[in-house]
Amino acid sequence: MRRIDSEIRCMLIPMREGRLLLPNATVAEIIGYREPDPVADAPTWLKGRVNWHQRDILVIDFERMLGRPDIGAGIRQRIAVCYALDPERGWPLLGLVAQGIPRLLRVNREAVESAHSGTHGESPVRMTLSVAGEELMVPDIDYLQAQLPAP
């Protein structure tokens, strides 16, 4: 029973360069990519707005937020619909562009080779982890939500 308690079910979100790691409970659904409707005066990392279950959500290109160039969409592109941690503060949901099909991963303490944490609320990346020789980024959902324009 102790082994189960120390595991976190996560979702690996593929990007063009690297992968995001999100707790599974943060991800509402993975949907097929559709071109978002533009948002006026949006930063380059904000792809626009899509409708999901009669709700508008804003779609973030996380890699563009990190300053990486836009190399276009691939045929396997998806949107990870995520719950915001403070739904009263603005958008209760947000979308993250995935460059492939996300997959489930169980992470336990023994699998983490190294971890580096940033300051909460100051960067799009909350933490980086090394798991099985691969560097994974954990996004700071609060930071992302704070960067979005008011609904």
Image (cartoon, grey):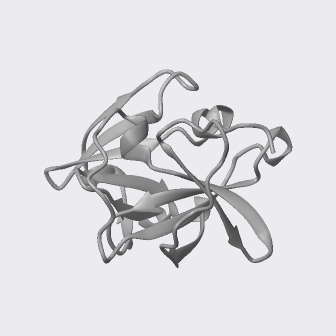
Residue 52 horizontal/vertical position (percent): 70, 73
Residue 75 horizontal/vertical position (percent): 31, 77
Q: Quadrant of residue 59?
A: bottom right
Side (left or right) of 26 relative to 80 = right
Residue drawn at the location 50% of the way across and 67% of the way down: 79
Q: Quadrant of residue 105?
A: bottom left
Residue 27 horizontal/vertical position (percent): 57, 64
- Relative vertical location of residue 67 with respect to residue 49 in this rendering, above or below: above
- Relative vertical location of residue 47 with respect to residue 73 in this rendering, above or below: above
Q: Nearer the viewer, residue 36 or 148?
A: 36
Residue 31 horizontal/vertical position (percent): 53, 76
Residue drawn at the location 75% of the way across and 62% of the way down: 56
Residue drawn at the location 30% of the way across and 58% of the way down: 72
Q: Is residue 135 visible?
A: yes
Name, please, the residue furthest toward the right: 88
The number of numbered badges drawn on the structure is 0
Q: Is residue 7 visible?
A: no
Residue drawn at the location 70% of the way across and 46% of the way down: 85
